[in-house]
Image: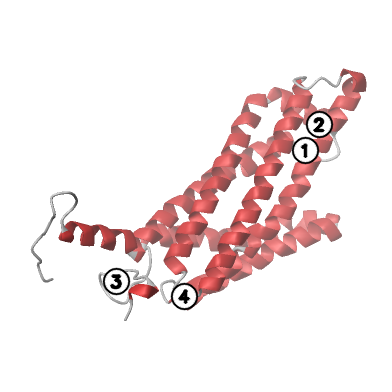
Amino acid sequence: MIATKPTTNGHGPTTSQAQVGEIALTSPKRLARIAGVLYLLVGIFGGFAQGFVYPKIYVAGDAATTAANLIANSGLVRLGVVADFFDNTIWVFLALTLYRLLKHVNKDAARAMVVLVAIGASITMLNAVFEFEGMRVATGAVNLGGFGAVGSNAVALLLLDAQHYGLLIASIFFGLWLVPLGYLAYKSGWFPKVLGVALIVGGACYLVDMLAAFLLPDFGKAIHGYVNIASAIAEIWMVGYLLVIGVKMSTPGERLVPKEGKA
């Protein structure tokens, strides 16, 4: 490494300090590990909100049980809603970080990835509002006395039903964003090509799950626990790779350089 003499004008960092900062910010490994941390947080918050809280609350077709669950777990519902907000906000920042990491491969695909995430995050956040309002109806925070207990329970179930099917619609984008991500990972040379393929297959599995739920409900319930296994494997693999390896570098010290900075 060639040493350079630091220079400064007395008002800011030295030239060498600025260069070191630029290298740190544009290091693919650094960006990849930031993305890995964000992806892990998405999994934690999303797993809590949709994998733990949601199944404890919603019982399809059973208004009385769903309402009772909302009343008994109102504090947990509030935590789940906030976790959903964190989950989807972090998901957007994850997409932006991956965009910066992979836009040199194909800028259009990277942009599509960010747009798909933004749409999916928006839908999921709106769905969380239905869950929150369902809890408020069940606990009496919204006065529906004219409906009676049975009517109030039915409204609470209707709101949770809206969330349920809204999440299925959001799963379109849970799957679609993995397709450009898998393509970018495959073409970049920084990740195993099989990982890129696995992400694309995982994205397709989300879509199969959604279509089966709407078109063939009984079949959809039967395959739901299996069809998402490929998606889970692909995403967990991606998280682990980003955190442990970052990216597979061909040149030590390689960093991202904006196109306009190239000769």
Task: Give the label, 4 or 1, closer to the camera.
Answer: 4
Q: Quadrant of the N terminus?
A: bottom left
Measure how far apart labels 3 and 2 are at the Cα level.
55 Å
Local crowd size for mark 2, using a 10 Å CA cut-off: few (<14), some (14–19), many (≥20): many
Residue annotated with mark 2: 156
Crowding near the residue tagged with mark 4, few <14, some 14–19, many ≥20 C-alpha atoms within 10 Å: some
Q: Are marks 3 and 1 in contact (CB under 8 Å)?
A: no
Task: Tell me which amino acid carries mark 1.
Answer: Leu
SS class, disc 3: loop
Please state which amino acid type lies under the numbered disc 4.
Val
Left or right of 189? Residue 171 is right
Which residue in the protein does label 4 denote? 105
Q: Residue at x 78, y 32 (%)?
A: 66
| Location of residue 97 in the rendering, given as x and y in whole percent from the top left corner | 45, 58
Neighbour tally class for label 3: few under 14, some 14-19, many 20 plus, Cα within 10 Å: few
What amino acid is found at the position of numbered circle 3 in the picture?
Glu
Q: Which residue is mark 3?
A: 254
Task: Pick whichever of labels 3 and 2 is earlier in the sequence.
Answer: 2
Q: Residue at x 69, y 49 (%)?
A: 123
